[in-house]
Image (cartoon, rainbow, N blue to C red):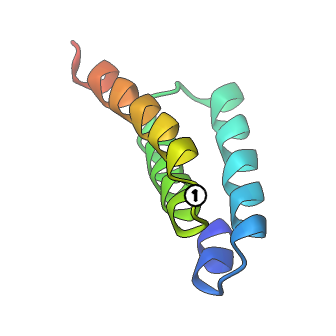
Amino acid sequence: LGTMCRLQGDLRRAEQHFRLALSLYDTSFTQSHVDAMICLMELVQVLQQDGRPNEAQQFEHQLELMNARRRRP
């Protein structure tokens, strides 16, 4: 739903959907689950499109940490 809203230009609803999905991933899977990472990347895009680069950068940093955790054995 978040992607659909983003593509339709409804960035506020897209953000809400992605944040909800991320909270569900936090309770259901590990934080470095690939779907959680995809969702986080989508949220970063929404924030950038919405003119909120500082918030997007914070989530990009979180994404880098998740990616580093996935690489560890």
Instruction: Name the residue located 61 percent from the left edge and 66 percent from the top edge.
Output: 50
- Residue 9 point in image, percent of width and height: 65, 83
- Residue 33 point in image, percent of width and height: 45, 35
Please name the residue that numbered disc 1 is placed on.
47
Which quadrant of the rendered structure holds the C terminus? top left
Question: As drawn, is 66 to the left or to the right of 42?
Answer: left
**Quarter of the image where one finds residue 23:** top right
Instruction: Name the residue located 63 percent from the left edge and 36 percent from the top edge.
Output: 25
- Residue 44 point in image, percent of width and height: 50, 53
51 or 61, which is in the foreground? 51
Disc 1 secondary structure class: helix
29 or 26, which is in the foreground? 26
Question: As drawn, is 36 to the left or to the right of 1?
Answer: left
Instruction: Name the residue located 71 percent from the left edge and 47 percent from the top edge.
Output: 19
Against 60, residue 52 (above or below) is below
Against 23, residue 53 (above or below) is below
